[in-house]
Image: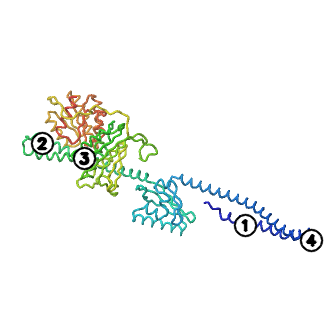
């Protein structure tokens, strides 16, 4: 860029030589005639010839001086213009939001600022193309494939004079980070210019979207399976608990029934995990202290393990808008994962701080205030192929794992409007980063629900209506309620329930409570039927029951006209506790 064009470099000496030649010819032709005309004496002619020679030399020197000064001024102006243009070009390249590198043969002549900032290398560290290839693509097989493809594209472009096709490459930065880029190669004279467009964030967003869509598809399937499975478990668990009540405490079958009930309880836990990332698992949020949830999970999960827990929370840690139960499940799963990664013991460090996200922040979340939680263990870490699938449902490296823990955690955090990411490498441990929206709402200090058995329901035979589409559930529910001293009627859908309630109300023998299944395939469900019953009797005592235990209506039942919740599957004791609470309230 500092050199003058070849045309300019040739014109300067040619002009000077031409002018000097013209002056010389004119002087030679006319100077001798002038001397002979003026002087007749031979001595004077000799002196005149000498003077003429010196005059010619001096005059020529003066003319050449002014000509050279003028040409040098022009030369300097052109050189300055070229330097200024070259600097402006470099400024433009440095301002580009892409990495630009230029090579002449195997020598790298230039890289722009974005290239250095993005990949971490200076021009001194990558003086040649070969050195750049070794650093950027350390995996020999991947480097060989990329370089072979690139050189093939260069040969085709030279032979056919066609554009060079861009292709995606994974570039290893100086700090070890891998950036996904699109490499676009151009010929400029004998030089090769490569433009790297960083698409790492775009690929992360695309992967996140694909992951969410996959979870939503599986969630729809899992929700339906879990609902049907809970209906089946209701019949099994209800009959088991009812049978234990009917038998004497010392009966030989009591142990077998208790073991069967425990196995059913484990099945219930599995359906709970399925429902967590099913379509019906939306959280019911309120302001909670993230520090209290983490401390509770750490104390519970680390008890009896060889792992040492450390916590470091910001003093002014913001609260989060979240479902406390679901977040506890997230932290429990992450802590269990850390414990399993350190079978011989180790350290689990949990930190939490406030985070402000704006348009310049990397996480793909809306602008606002967030709480950032990091859980870092000192385990053996994970290989890249495992890391890529860590949040996939049913993917597990544990012999006894179900592969739902981290998938559920991912789904829960996503439904809370946050993000969860993991970084790990072999021998370096694993770090999970959870980001959740913060809130200024004060936490509710009152107990939302008191557990345990309440006072006994008054002994007179109160009337209960049970609405459920499953005959087996209606049958076992009627048996349980009969055992508890209630008079029971059953029906199969909401339309029958509304008609039955209206008839009982008109006859002067109203129902004291109605247990309503939330979901009735092909019929009137509990939510709609409840509104119609409340229109008949604003004091109706309605209890919602569903296999979709994570449905928002189940958690926010009071705002939908219900007074209590009976989640499927349930035991005799669960039914007694709920009825005691709503009828004594």
The earlier-in-sequence mark between 4 and 2 is 4
- Residue 182 in view here: yes
Residue 130 appears left or right of 234: right
The earlier-in-sequence mark between 4 and 1 is 1
The earlier-in-sequence mark between 2 and 1 is 1
Residue pointed to by mark 1? 14
In front of the other: 251 or 444: 444
Mark 1 or mark 3, whichever is nearer to me: 1
The earlier-in-sequence mark between 1 and 3 is 1
Label 4 with label 1: CB-CB less than 8 Å: no
* Occupied quadrant, residue 70: bottom right
Quarter of the image that includes the N terminus: bottom right
Residue pointed to by mark 2? 243
Mark 2 or mark 3, whichever is nearer to me: 3
Residue 499 position in % (x across, y down)? 25, 34
Give how far apart the Cα atoms at labels 4 and 2 are.
156 Å
**Coloring applied to the structure:** rainbow
Give how far apart the Cα atoms at labels 4 and 3 are.
133 Å
Looking at the image, residue 24 lies above or below residue 168: below
Residue 356 appears left or right of 513: right
Residue pointed to by mark 4? 41
Seen as rendered, the residue at the extreme top is 508
Disc 3 residue crowd, few under 14, some 14–19, many 20+, Cα 10 Å = many
Label 1 with label 3: CB-CB less than 8 Å: no
Is disc 2 placed on a helix, strand or loop? helix
Mark 2 or mark 1, whichever is nearer to me: 1
Residue pointed to by mark 3? 271
Give how far apart the Cα atoms at labels 2 and 1 are.
117 Å
Residue 511 position in % (x across, y down)? 21, 31
Mark 4 or mark 2, whichever is nearer to me: 4
Label 2 with label 3: CB-CB less than 8 Å: no
Disc 1 residue crowd, few under 14, some 14–19, many 20+, Cα 10 Å = few
């Amino acid at each position: 860029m500092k050199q003058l064009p070849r045309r300019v470099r040739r014109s300067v000496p040619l002009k000077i030589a031409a002018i000097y030649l013209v002056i010389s010819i004119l002087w030679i032709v006319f100077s001798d005639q002038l001397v002979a005309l003026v002087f007749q004496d031979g001595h004077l002619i000799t002196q005149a010839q000498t003077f003429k020679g010196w005059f010619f030399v001096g005059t020529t020197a003066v003319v050449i001086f002014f000509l050279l000064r003028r040409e040098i001024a022009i030369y300097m102006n052109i050189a300055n213009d070229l330097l200024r243009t070259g600097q402006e070009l470099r400024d433009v390249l440095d301002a580009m939001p892409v990495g630009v590198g230029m090579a002449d043969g195997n020598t790298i002549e230039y890289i722009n600022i974005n290239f250095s900032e993005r990949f971490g290398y200076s021009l001194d560290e990558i003086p040649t193309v070969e050195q750049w290839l070794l650093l950027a693509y350390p995996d020999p097989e991947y480097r060989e494939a990329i370089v072979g493809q690139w050189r093939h594209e260069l040969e085709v472009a030279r032979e056919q004079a066609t554009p060079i096709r861009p292709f995606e490459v994974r570039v290893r930065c100086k700090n070890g980070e891998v950036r996904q880029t699109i490499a676009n190669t151009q010929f400029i004279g004998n030089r090769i210019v490569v433009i790297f467009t960083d698409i790492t964030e775009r690929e992360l967003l695309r992967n996140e979207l694909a992951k969410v869509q996959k979870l939503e598809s599986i969630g729809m399937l899992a929700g339906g399976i879990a609902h049907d499975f809970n209906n089946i478990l209701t019949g099994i668990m209800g009959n088991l608990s009812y049978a234990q009540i009917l038998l004497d405490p010392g009966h030989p079958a009591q142990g077998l029934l208790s073991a069967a009930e425990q196995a059913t309880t484990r099945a219930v836990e599995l359906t709970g995990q399925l429902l967590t990332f099913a379509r019906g698992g939306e959280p019911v949020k309120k302001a909670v202290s993230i520090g209290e949830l983490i401390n509770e999970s750490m104390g519970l999960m680390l008890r009896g393990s060889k792992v040492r827990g450390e916590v470091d929370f910001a003093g002014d840690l913001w609260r989060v808008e979240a479902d406390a139960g679901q977040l506890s499940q997230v932290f429990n799963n992450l802590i269990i994962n850390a414990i399993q990664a350190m079978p011989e013991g180790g350290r689990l460090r949990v930190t939490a701080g406030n985070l402000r996200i704006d348009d310049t922040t990397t996480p793909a979340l809306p602008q606002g205030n967030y709480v950032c939680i990091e859980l870092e263990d000192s385990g053996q870490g994970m290989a890249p192929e495992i890391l890529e699938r860590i949040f996939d449902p049913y993917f597990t490296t544990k012999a006894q794992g179900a592969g739902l823990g981290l998938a559920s955690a991912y789904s829960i955090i996503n439904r809370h409007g946050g993000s969860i990411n993991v970084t790990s490498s072999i021998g370096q441990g694993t770090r999970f980063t959870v980001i959740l929206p913060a809130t200024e709402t004060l936490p509710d200090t009152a107990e939302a629900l008191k557990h345990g058995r309440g006072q006994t329901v008054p002994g007179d035979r109160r009337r209960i209506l049970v609405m459920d589409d499953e005959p087996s559930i209606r049958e076992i529910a009627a048996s349980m309620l009969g055992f508890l001293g209630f008079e029971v009627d059953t029906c199969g859908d909401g339309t029958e329930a509304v008609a039955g309630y209206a008839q009982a109300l008109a006859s002067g023998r109203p129902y004291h409570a109605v247990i309503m299944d939330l979901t009735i395939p092909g019929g009137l469900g509990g939510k709609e039927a409840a509104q119609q019953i409340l229109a008949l009797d604003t004091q109706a005592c309605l209890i919602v029951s569903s296999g979709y235990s994570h449905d928002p209506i189940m958690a926010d039942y009071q705002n939908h006209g219900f007074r209590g919740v009976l989640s499927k599957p349930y035991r005799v004791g669960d039914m007694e506790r709920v009825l005691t609470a709503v009828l004594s309230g």
